[in-house]
Amino acid sequence: MDTFNSFSKDVMDKLGYYVYRLIDPRNGQTFYVGKGQRNRVFAHINDALKNYQNESYSVESEDNISNKIQTIREIRNEGLEVIHVIHRWGLTDKEAFEVEAALIDAYAGLTNIQVGHNSDRGVTNAAVLQKNLSAKQYDEPDNIKYIIIKIRNETVSNYQEEHPNISHEDCIYEATRSCWVISVERAKTYDYVLGVIDGIVKGVYKVKEWKQVKDTNRYEFEREDIETDVVNYFINKRIPDEYTKKGSSNPIQYCRK
């Protein structure tokens, strides 16, 4: 597998400021927290390897080599790659400083020299973020009324662990369909539900009925057979930006048309 070490230009334009973590693949530990724009997250590797794997490298002041750079070199010596995780993105410069400071406080033993809610832009592997943000966005259809329900990968994974004989697709459905505080009368006027993870449509369902979950004020839906062309229109595409704006913290959103 080729090393992933840069975002594409169109993705860089969408990122804004972000806060990232560098993780040691040997032990899963975060060893550096930083903030930046564009391809800043990958700059540390380039600095650490400059004049490193060629004959011109000389250790003129080994004591001055930072713990961060030394860690990166040790990882490479083991034939491994640093794991890049984007912790929050789409931030202002001020917001990024605050998130960075909080993370530096949260992780002990960092190699940083200096100390120091928006789930759609939450902690994400850099390669996954590249894939998600470069995914094609669907155009708002005129003749399809749908509800977006945002779910988490962790919810799907937990359901899969509890029900190992169920397919991954059915686990996405189970995570999407139940159980929500929702205006059921309003929900009944929408024919379809999209299960969305990290801004990408992972499930498309035609609603047969909504019903109340016993002894709660929450509701769940049951699906019925759906038209193939409707599934193909949405599946694995990115939802429009208006559904991922700051302040869109409610996991349930209704289409705008």
Image (cartoon, rainbow, N blue to C red):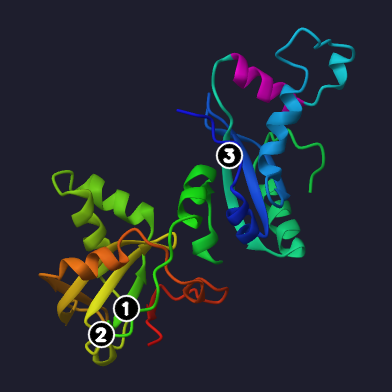
Q: Main secondary structure of the magenta part?
A: helix
Give the amino acid at mark 1.
Answer: Ile
Q: Residues within 10 Å of mark 2 (few under 14, many from 20)?
A: some
Image coordinates of residue 48 in percent, x first then y, are 74, 25
Mark 2 or mark 3: which comes first in sequence?
3
Residues at marks 1 and 2 touching, judged by CB atoms closer than 8 Å: yes
User: Does residue 171 belong to the magenta stretch?
Assistant: no
Tell me the tag on residue 147: 1
Of callouts 1 and 2, the N-terminal one: 1
Look at mark 2 in the image and give the residue it sits on: 190
**What's the residue type where badge 2 is placed?**
Tyr
**Magenta region:** 67-77
Residue that mark 3 sits on: 84
Tell me if residue 162 comes above or below residue 76 in the rendering. below
Q: Earlier in the sequence, mark 1 or mark 3?
A: 3
Callouts 1 and 3 close, C-beta under 8 Å = no
Q: Nearer the viewer, residue 113 or 34?
A: 34
Q: Quadrant of the C terminus?
A: bottom left
Q: Position of residue 26 (x, y in %)?
A: 53, 23
